[in-house]
Amino acid sequence: MRTASQPWTVKVRTDDLPQAGRRVVLTADEATRIAVARQAGVAGIDRLEAAFELTRAGRDGVRVSGDVAATVRQTCVVTLEPIESQIRETVDLAFAPGTPDADGREPAEIAIGPPEPPEPLIGAAVDLGAIATEFLILGIDPYPRKGDAVFEAPPAAAAGSGPFDVLAPPKKADGERR
């Protein structure tokens, strides 16, 4: 089910994952690409694909590895012309069941330190659409620039010719202030 905060949802149950693993290939339809583009803040997404390998990690964990590829339409920050960007992001995540606290809820914090702890596995499914969306957004250049675009700063204003010069005392004939 698509929501505004989660425009692409493809849940895969982990409890029936074969021991040999599973390959999942996703291709976003037009409605999904429009929704993801809106969330990513780009002009459009012409192609959005993901290929993942799901394998068992430990007794109840899952490893998701693969890549996300997309063609994204953006606006050049220098020329304001439309440009296309090719995005390719590598995914390698481990998921493990969260350890519920005394109330039976998932913990609010996860200890950070080497090695990186696995992502909490909530329920018995991973959302591959959400993973693909997250990695796509991480891969988008927030300041896209056409290859030949060069920013030219406007000419510097002459010294003493600022907007508040009308408030300064008038100048003498030799250019000095009175």
Image (spheres, grey):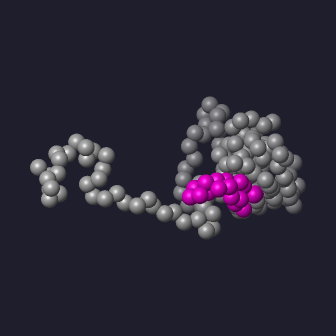
Q: Mainly helix, strand or loop, the magenta region?
A: strand
Please say if 139 is above or below 163: below
Q: Is residue 133 left or right of residue 154?
A: right
Please say if 4 is above or below 77: above
Q: Residue 15: image x %, image y %?
A: 83, 46
Residue pictured at 68% horizontal, 58% vertical: 83
Residue pictured at 16% horizontal, 45% vertical: 169
Q: Residue 17: image x %, image y %?
A: 86, 52
Count of labels shown?
0
Q: Nearer the viewer, residue 111 or 102?
A: 111
Choose top left, top right, bottom left or bottom right for residue 98. top right
Judge whether residue 135 can be spotted in this image: no
Q: Residue 16: image x %, image y %?
A: 87, 48
Judge whether residue 111 can be spotted in this image: yes
Check residue 73 for magenta coloring. yes
Choose top left, top right, bottom left or bottom right for residue 87. bottom right
Residue range corresponding to the magenta coloring = 70-87
Name the quadrant of the N terminus. top right
- Residue at the top extreme of this rendering: 103
Q: Residue 135: image x %, image y %?
A: 68, 54
Choose top left, top right, bottom left or bottom right for residue 62. bottom right
Q: Nearer the viewer, residue 137 or 103?
A: 137
Check residue 34 for magenta coloring. no
